[in-house]
Image: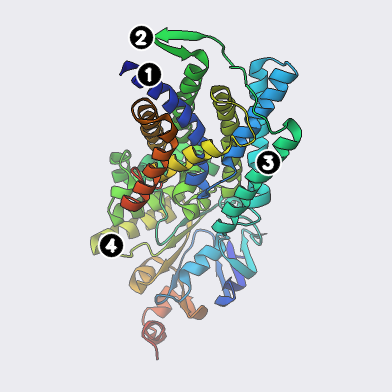
């Protein structure tokens, strides 16, 4: 049994169906990648796991069903989320954004702050700065930091490189690898940038129009022409 | 001039106390609660019944009024706001209807004539030739204390930060483990309690009457519109702008026009700066 298991997941926005029978499985301590073009359903899948979208099907974490649980309970069970648009609190300082992340993990505040500051020293230097005045790269750091403050066992990261310069993408990649290795964190990354996902993930799921078109190990898929087709069509 | 300064400060403090509960609901829940004036009326009449009719100690009466306001806030949230979630116009119309229903209930229970509410703290102090009642002084200090307390609460406690987070980004709050409904319940309960306490001070400054919910509602709406989506500091500043404007109009132009100028201010801000003077989504 996998650490995260998604079975036959369907998602709906009103009457419109956004995901069609998605199934995936992750081992504990693994990094997996969901790749696909814009609109393929990557963010919807992440939102479904967090209980933010109406779904049918099954999602389990460490064997326990997440069906019908409110997002707050899913966070308590150990899933942290750094969404694509960050969803930070723009008129709060960096520190307050991180402290909001600790809402369900108040006993771990100091330890988690040390971890976040260790991974992102810039956040400690700028802890009094409002996030509305920060660059995209800094906001991504705050977003990841806030997710870490929830004491997650599984981290969902949506489009971590979107709009970032290559050097910053490398920094984010290094941090995600460190989280995985040093904190034994299971990480699911949704990325348009397939090279980034292929570089980090052991297993890749290619999403197209709300369906998994191909899946396999990153090594197998690296040169698979079907990966290109998923982005540019047949 | 000094009298205008003193009267302006006192009235502004009372207005800040009146408006803070309304601002909280608007900032966090994005709801224009048009039944807010009724919380003040329920507070005023509850205090009247328990302290003035039954004779329980004034502070206990104030506490009972706060509890009544809190319960009213919770009921409005559960029965109207949650039921009509997402439909702002329906919520606004329903809360306005509720205010009229509460007014009718008050007429049934207490009659339609105005009543004098004795001050919580009787007595007068003379400041540079101006008579200042202890009651309005207490209202001003209560207004400042509530705003300072709220400022501290929002910045230094987990629940306060969660309130602020919900006001800024609902999804961000949810993925941080915050239950927005729980935070909204706390906000509505707190808003109702603060409104009821403000109602006791307001009624003892003016008088108790079944239509007393209208003026505080207009003041609160003016504070939100002029201030923008309510920051705590913005609430305090706009309460002072309106308070001083009313005192100056009363003293130098015509007492009958004091409310009119507040209305004109609302219209001017809506035309010239619709986001308000301090408009940003923050508590």
| Few, some or many residues within 10 Å of mark 2 (<14, 14–19, 20+) | few
Residue B186 visible in the displayed image = no
Distance from disc 1 to disc 4, alpha carbons, whole Å, reads: 56 Å
Figure quadrant of residue B247 = top left
Provide residue A73's location: percent of width, then percent of height: 61, 51
Badge 4: few (under 14), some or many (20 or more) residues near its Cα, within 10 Å? some
Can the viewer see residue B10? yes
Which residue, given by chain and number where applicable, does mark 1 sit on? Answer: B6
Q: CA distance from mark 3 to mark 4?
A: 56 Å
Marks 3 and 1 belong to one chain: yes
- In this rendering, would B195 be left or right of B45? left
Label at residue B102: 3
The secondary element bearing badge 3 is classed as helix
Q: Nearer the viewer, mark 2 or mark 4?
A: 2
Residue indicated by mark 4 = A164
Q: State the residue at coordinates (59%, 51%).
A: A77
| Element type at mark 4 | loop
Question: Total of numbered circles in the picture?
Answer: 4
Identify whether A5 is placed above or below B17: below
- Return the mark for residue B128: 2
Q: Chain of mark 2?
A: B
Residue B50, by quadrant, is top right
| x then y, percent, for residue B84 | 63, 57
- Check if mark 2 and mark 4 are on a common chain: no
Identify the residue shown where x is 55% and y is 25%: B206
Mark 3 belongs to chain: B
Does label 2 or label 3 sit earlier along the sequence? Answer: 3
| Whether label 2 touches label 4, CB < 8 Å | no
Q: Tell whether label 4 touches label 1 (CB within 8 Å).
A: no
As drawn, B283 above or below A176 = above
* Mark pair 2, 4: CA separation: 64 Å
């Amino acid at each position: 049994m996998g650490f995260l298991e998604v079975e036959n997941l369907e998602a709906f926005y009103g009457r419109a169906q956004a995901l069609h029978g998605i199934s995936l499985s992750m081992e504990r301590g693994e990094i997996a990648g969901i790749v696909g073009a814009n609109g393929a359903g990557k963010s919807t899948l992440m939102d479904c796991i967090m209980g933010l979208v109406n779904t049918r099907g099954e999602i389990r974490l460490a064997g326990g069903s997440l069906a019908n649980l409110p997002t707050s309970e899913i966070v308590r069970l150990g899933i942290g989320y750094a969404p694509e648009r960050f969803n930070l609190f723009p008129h709060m300082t960096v520190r307050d954004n991180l402290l909001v992340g600790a809402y369900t993990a108040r006993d771990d505040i100091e330890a988690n702050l040390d971890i976040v500051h260790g991974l992102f020293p810039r956040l400690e230097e700028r802890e009094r700065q409002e996030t509305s005045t920060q660059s995209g790269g800094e906001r991504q750091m705050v977003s990841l930091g806030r997710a870490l403050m929830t004491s997650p066992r599984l981290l969902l990261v949506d489009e971590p490189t979107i709009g970032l310069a290559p050097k910053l993408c490398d920094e984010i990649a290094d941090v995600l690898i460190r989280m995985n290795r040093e904190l034994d964190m299971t990480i699911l990354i949704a990325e348009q940038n397939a090279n980034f996902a292929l570089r980090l993930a052991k297993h890749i799921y290619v999403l197209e129009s709300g369906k998994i078109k191909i899946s396999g190990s990153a090594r197998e898929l690296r040169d698979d022409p079907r990966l290109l087709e998923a982005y540019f069509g047949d | 001039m000094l009298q205008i300064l003193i009267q302006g400060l006192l009235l502004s403090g009372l207005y800040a106390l009146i408006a803070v509960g309304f601002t909280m609901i608007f900032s966090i829940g994005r709801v224009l609660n048009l039944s807010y004036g009724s919380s003040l009326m329920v507070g005023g009449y509850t205090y009247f019944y328990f302290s003035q009719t039954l004779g329980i100690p004034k502070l206990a009466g104030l506490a009972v009024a706060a509890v009544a306001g809190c319960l009213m806030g919770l009921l409005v949230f559960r029965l109207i706001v949650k039921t009509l979630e997402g439909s702002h116009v329906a919520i606004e119309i329903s809360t306005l209807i509720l205010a009229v229903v509460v007014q009718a209930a008050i007429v049934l229970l207490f009659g339609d004539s105005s009543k004098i509410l004795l001050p919580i703290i009787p007595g007068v102090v003379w400041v540079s030739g101006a008579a200042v009642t202890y009651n309005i002084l207490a209202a001003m200090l209560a207004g400042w204390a509530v705003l300072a307390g709220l400022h501290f609460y929002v910045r230094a406690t987990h629940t306060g930060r969660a309130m602020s987070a919900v006001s800024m980004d609902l999804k961000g709050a949810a993925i941080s483990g915050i239950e927005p409904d729980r935070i909204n319940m706390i906000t509505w309960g707190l808003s109702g309690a603060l409104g009821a306490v403000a109602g006791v001070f307001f009624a003892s400054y003016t008088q108790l009457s079944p239509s007393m919910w209208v003026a505080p509602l207009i003041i609160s709406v003016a504070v939100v519109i002029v201030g923008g989506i309510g920051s705590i500091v913005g609430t305090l500043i706009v309460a002072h702008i309106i308070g001083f404007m009313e005192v100056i109009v009363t003293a130098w132009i015509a007492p009958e026009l004091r409310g009119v100028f507040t209305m004109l201010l609302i219209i001017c801000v809506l035309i010239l700066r619709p986001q308000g003077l301090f408009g940003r989504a923050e508590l």
